[in-house]
Amino acid sequence: MTTRILIVAEHDGARLNASTAKCVTCARALPQAEIAIAVLAADGGAVCAQAAALTGVSRVLRVDHAANAHALAATWAPQIAALAKGFTHVFGPSTTFGKDLMPRVAALLGIPQVSDIMAVEGAHRFRRPVYAGNAILTVEAPADSALVGTVRVASFEATPAGGSAPIENASPAVELPTHTRFVSVSAGSTDRPDLQAASRVISGGRALGSAENFKLLFSLADKLGAAVGASRAAVDAGYAPNELQVGQTGKIIAPELYIAIGISGAIQHLTGIKDARTIVAINKDAEAPIFEVADLGLVGDLFTILPELERLLSQR
Amino acid sequence: MSRILVCIKRVVDFNVRVRIKPDGSGVVTDGVKMSINPFDEIALEEALRVKERGGAQEVVVTSIGPSECQQQLRTALAMGADRAILVQTEVSVEPLTAARVFLELTRREQPQLVILGKQAIDDDNNQTGQMLAALWGRPQATFASRLELEGGKATVTREVDAGLETIEVDLPAVITTDLRLNEPRYVKLPEIMKAKKKPLATFSLQDLGIAAAQQLKVVRCDPPPQRQKGLMVKDVGELVAALKKKGVL
């Protein structure tokens, strides 16, 4: 049986987010996958070109509309629901973008959603984490109905470029609501590697003690070309902005190297880092649960360890 | 009358380390401490604060589940909700079914706002609020960290991957809460006594005309793959050497 998968592209108007290429990898794991990517934008030309280049994509649907300038779920969902006709699966990334949008699509279509797909076991059978990753469910959706899925981006590599799919204009005939309006977005600094895409991440916890001390992590991160993350405790305490939060309710990441500094390792945090290749923990409490998952652990005072680590790394 | 509907879920308490049943059919919930889903507690707190500022006259709290959900509803009443509605069912309810139940309650209660947690910490689905907004044909403001109400509109700051996004929505609307929206209050003993006298209505799914469609079948529940216990190093020099040996530096 052929599966026809529609993937909703995540982008910022100019660049396709890497989460979309990861959705393509997930979709390609379905049997006899035919993959289309929908690009909703005010002017989607550049993003469509990037989507069309992804290996394994058979076509790109370009939906240009002034109202699509920002990804408002209430505006996008009816358009995607209209485009979904004829598809067996509608996928989006399990980022805040996809988490906001995809259930609205599923409800408009009256079909179930499988959240946080981490593995594909068949056209309608998937594995997904529950209880902050402390249990893994294998779920099966009915074969006679379409389904919506969000793809856990930490579980899939990005599909590389290498294709050249045709780009078709599409204009779904739906009425767009005016009850939801974009006001503003305050993005953090963008001169650092993106937390969800970085191969190295350094995270700080409450033990940093202040927003001022938290900045110590940034110079070490710069030495390593790493992104900076934070535990919930550090964000709640105001040491770091919310977009740095790693964990069950923040970002789920899978870097090559994860260095946790002054993070005790609540299960909600650990679920966000379990897919990291190498985990390093630095903490003054030898009993901290972070050491149970760390590949390398060092017990000690972070304020003496951090400068020394930075010095040794500079000598390389 | 201006009303806020708050939807709460009874879940395994967030401090409990869950165990998988030996037969792999799910996680052990018998004899385990149950609580209001923490995100829903934040939703209730926000509703109470809106009411206390004069932004609403009544806060109605609702839950779907077995009769034991009355415990969580009584806690919610003790926190300050005015009355409670239990939609009683013994079967597990999927997000789309939950959204249909809440849609029916919006028809009956005509709330200006429905506030609920962005996700429940048991199944981590993060779907119900968005689905309700879709079925209701009303705006959604998910992952809220700040809510302001004025003149039939809500201005909501949302925690998104890029940072903080602000949107404006017309009421009625659905809000789902993130962690930093507020810190829920503690319940005081006299409030617990008072809560026993507050009204708690019970309906079945049938009463509301909802069929509990079970669409997703759980085939298996497994423990997650465990990471190998790692190596403890003595000092920074050893750490850097070990990282180099692993080839990650």
Image (cartoon, coloured by chain):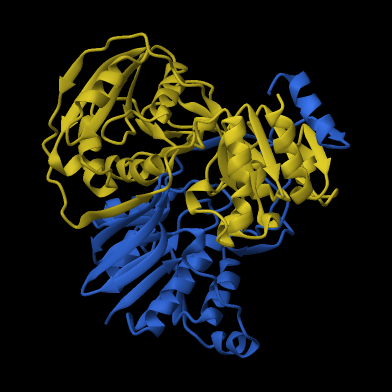
Chain colours: A yellow, B blue
Residue B68, percent from left and from top: 60, 67
Give the side of residue B204 with respect to residue A215, left or right: left
Q: Residue furthest right?
A: B234
Give the side of residue A140 with respect to residue A132, left or right: left
Give the side of residue B147 with respect to residue A135, left or right: left
Residue A213, percent from left and from top: 64, 55
Q: Is residue B241 above or below residue A99?
A: above
One can see residue B20 in this view: no
Q: Quadrant of the C terminus of chain B?
A: top right
Which of these two is toward me, A30 or B245? B245
Q: Is residue A77 above or below residue A214?
A: above
Q: Residue at x 52, y 47 (%)?
A: A244
Query: Quadrant of the rendered structure where residue B233 is?
Result: top right
Give the side of residue A307 with respect to residue B71, left or right: right
Which of these two is toward me, A118 or A289? A289
Query: Quadrant of the rendered structure where residue B30 is?
Result: bottom right
Q: Quadrant of the N terminus of chain B?
A: bottom left
Q: Residue at x 53, y 67 (%)?
A: B41
Which of these two is toward me, B149 or A202? A202
One can see residue B8 in this view: yes
* Label total for image: 0
Q: Residue at x 33, y 18 (%)?
A: A35
Q: Is residue B84 above or below residue B14?
A: below
Which of these two is toward me, A233 or B205? A233
Residue B116, percent from left and from top: 43, 62
Residue B234, percent from left and from top: 88, 37
